[in-house]
Image (tube, rainbow, N blue to C red):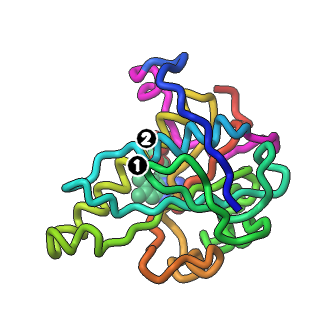
Amino acid sequence: MKIKLEEADKKGTVSVEEAIARRKSRRAFKSIKLTGKQLSQVLWAALKAPSAGATYPLALYVVIGADCVEQIEAGVYHAERGHSELERHKEGDLRAALADACLGQRFIAHAPVSLVIAAEYERTTRRYGDRGVRYVLIEVGHASQNVYLECEGLGLATVAIGAFYDEAVSRVLDLPRQHRPLYVMPVGASAEKL
Ligand SMILES: Cc1cc2nc3c(=O)[nH]c(=O)nc-3n(C[C@H](O)[C@H](O)[C@H](O)COP(=O)(O)O)c2cc1C
């Protein structure tokens, strides 16, 4: 099943400086649906990060809950750089299982969606050898910061999650062996006053 993503807006209402100044990790989510536009905008930001030698090792998955994004069913979806669609990879609302895999950080189960940024190291190490590992880890930081700033611009909450069992996250999402999870970022309307 493929879902068409919307084209990202290139002009927002919050300046880069305001987004940087306001950015913080937000872990309280309201249970209201995201729009397809909001999700498209956040995915665009995640994939618009620089890449060593343009090797693009990051693979982006989105765990979507039931009734959590307008007109998108629950499941795990895969987004690729340069593609204007999301492809369903697995069915079902897997937010609680993802929270368990993240050492029981329950707020993850309450966010309507979570991005899982994985990496295919070989895409970069093939060119740069062992140093490619460093480049991939730097790159996931770029992608994550873009997500933080885009969420701030949209008035959404997010937090970078590094504490999880790699094997458990891979199992919950049914990730292909070569895609190793590096970061989880729950995203949703903020329950805090922004
Ligand atoms: C590599 C990394 C891993 C992190 N892992 C977690 C995590 O597992 N759970 C969590 O709640 N926050 C996590 N955070 C968010 C930090 O707790 C947060 O950035 C820090 O407390 C500073 O707060 P701020 O982001 O609001 O400036 C992580 C941040 C980084 C950079």
Marks 2/1 in contact by CB < 8 Å: the verdict is yes
Q: Where the N terminus falls, by quadrant?
A: bottom right
Q: Quadrant of the rendered structure where residue 41 is?
A: top right
- Direction from residue 132 to residue 187 in the image, left or right: right
Q: Is residue 15 above or below residue 114?
A: above
Residue that numbered label 2 is attached to: 146
- Direction from residue 77 to residue 176 in the image, left or right: left
Tell me the SS state at disc 1: helix
Residue 19 lies in the magenta stretch: yes
Q: Quadrant of the rendered structure where residue 194 is?
A: top right
Q: Main secondary structure of the magenta part?
A: loop
Q: Hey, what amino acid is under mark 1?
A: Ala
Image: magenta residue range: 16-34
Q: Hey, what amino acid is under mark 2?
A: Asn
Q: Residues within 10 Å of mark 1 (few under 14, many from 20)?
A: many
Dot label at residue 143: 1
Instruction: Identify the residue at image location x=42%, y=28%.
Output: 20
Depth check, front residue: 22 or 121: 121
Dot label at residue 133: none
Q: Residues within 10 Å of mark 2 (few under 14, many from 20)?
A: many
The percent position of residue 28, horizontal first and vertical second, equals 70, 44
Instruction: Identify the residue at image location x=44%, y=52%.
Output: 81
Residue 71 can be seen in this image: yes
Instruction: Identify the residue at image location x=37%, y=56%.
Output: 140
Tell me the SS state at disc 2: helix
Residue 157 can be seen in this image: no
Q: Is residue 181 above or below residue 28?
A: below
The percent position of residue 83, horizontal first and vertical second, equals 50, 50
Q: Quadrant of the rendered structure where residue 175 is?
A: bottom right
Residue most toward the right? 67
Instruction: Identify the residue at image location x=51%, y=79%.
Output: 176
- Direction from residue 103 to residue 14 in the image, left or right: left
